[in-house]
Image (tube, rainbow, N blue to C red):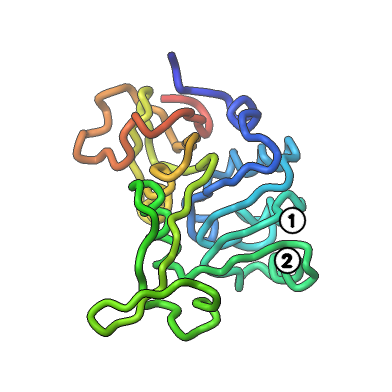
């Protein structure tokens, strides 16, 4: 059965209230067609797990602008004043997580681990109310693993079975998030025949990818 889908059909699988992981860094490596279609279909009450919320009108910022997000779990929101405004007004829940900790929590979720131990945040507001353990005289926060209902990821190329190859900064959170969600929807720049992606270049194997949408004409 083909994994290739139209963007609209792929997004129709996302229910209101879904917990989404969205790859990218300031919009780079974020799947733009999927973001635009989420806005068009008006999916609401979303929880978004991502590195950041980009900027107004860019990437995840479009979801914020449209009022579709109820909660954000991210490493920073400093480049999006709209996210800040909604948080201060109490209209958007924001959970700020140090960037490395966020990546490790996602990785742990995809690896079947319960969480990770990190010294980052000990003794700061980031560690308030969290469990700690001491090992060899060092105090660590116990950070729980993160998983999601659906991951929306961007890639340079996909073949028709769903193997993914990434390029440059697209290889940030995208591969980790492809491991940590029940449903993975990939938006590559191109779809190529099976065998065109060298085995050593495959970062996310096809068994992890459920749906593929494509930008422009297929190749």
Q: Is residue 178 left or right of residue 10?
A: left
Q: Secondary structure at mark 2?
A: helix
Give the quarter of the figure containing the C terminus. top left
- The relative height of residue 93 versus residue 42 in the rendered view (above or below) is below
Q: Is residue 114 left or right of residue 138?
A: right
Question: What residue appears at the point 67 percent right and 35 percent down from the top-left corner?
Answer: 15
Give the quarter of the figure containing the N terminus. top left
Q: In this rendered view, identify the residue nearer to me: 148 or 14.
A: 148
Q: How many numbered marks have been drawn onto this rendered protein structure?
A: 2
Mark 2 crowd level (few <14, some 14–19, many ≥20, 10 Å Cα): some
Residue 149 occupies which quadrant of the picture?
top right
Q: Is residue 189 left or right of residue 129?
A: left
| Label 2 vs 1, first from the N-terminus | 1
Question: What residue appears at the point 49 percent right and 34 percent down from the top-left corner?
Answer: 183
Label 2, label 1: how far apart the Cα atoms are:
7 Å
Q: In this rendered view, identify the residue nearer to me: 146 or 85.
A: 146
Question: What residue appears at the point 69 percent right and 65 percent down from the top-left corner?
Answer: 83
- The relative height of residue 121 versus residue 113 in the rendered view (above or below) is below
Mark 1 crowd level (few <14, some 14–19, many ≥20, 10 Å Cα): some
Residue under numbered circle 2: 82
Of all residues, the one furthest to the left in this rendering is 200
Q: Are marks 2 and 1 in contact (CB under 8 Å)?
A: yes
Residue under numbered circle 1: 65
Residue 73 occupies which quadrant of the picture?
bottom right
Question: What residue appears at the point 52 percent right and 48 percent down from the top-left corner?
Answer: 21
Location of residue 72 in the rendering, given as x and y in whole percent from the top left corner: 62, 59
């Amino acid at each position: 059965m083909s994994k290739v889908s139209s963007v609209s059909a792929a997004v129709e699988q996302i229910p209101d209230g879904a917990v989404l992981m969205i790859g990218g860094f300031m919009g780079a490596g974020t799947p733009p067609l999927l973001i635009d279609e989420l806005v068009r279909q008006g999916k609401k009450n979303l929880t978004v797990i991502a590195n950041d919320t980009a900027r107004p009108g860019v990437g995840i910022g479009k979801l914020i602008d449209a009022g579709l997000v109820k909660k954000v779990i991210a490493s920073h929101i400093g480049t999006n004043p709209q996210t800040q405004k909604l948080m201060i007004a109490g209209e958007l829940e924001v959970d700020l997580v140090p960037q490395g900790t966020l990546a490790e929590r996602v990785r742990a979720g995809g690896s079947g681990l319960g969480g990770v131990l990190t010294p980052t945040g000990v003794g700061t507001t980031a560690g308030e109310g969290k469990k700690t353990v001491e090992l060899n005289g060092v105090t660590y926060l116990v950070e729980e693993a993160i998983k999601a209902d659906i991951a929306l990821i961007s890639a340079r190329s996909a073949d028709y079975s769903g193997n993914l190859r990434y390029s440059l900064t697209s290889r940030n959170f995208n591969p980790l998030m492809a491991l940590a969600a029940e449903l993975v929807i990939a938006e590559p720049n191109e779809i190529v025949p099976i065998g065109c992606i060298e085995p050593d270049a495959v970062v996310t194997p096809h068994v992890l990818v459920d749906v593929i949408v494509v930008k422009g004409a297929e190749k």
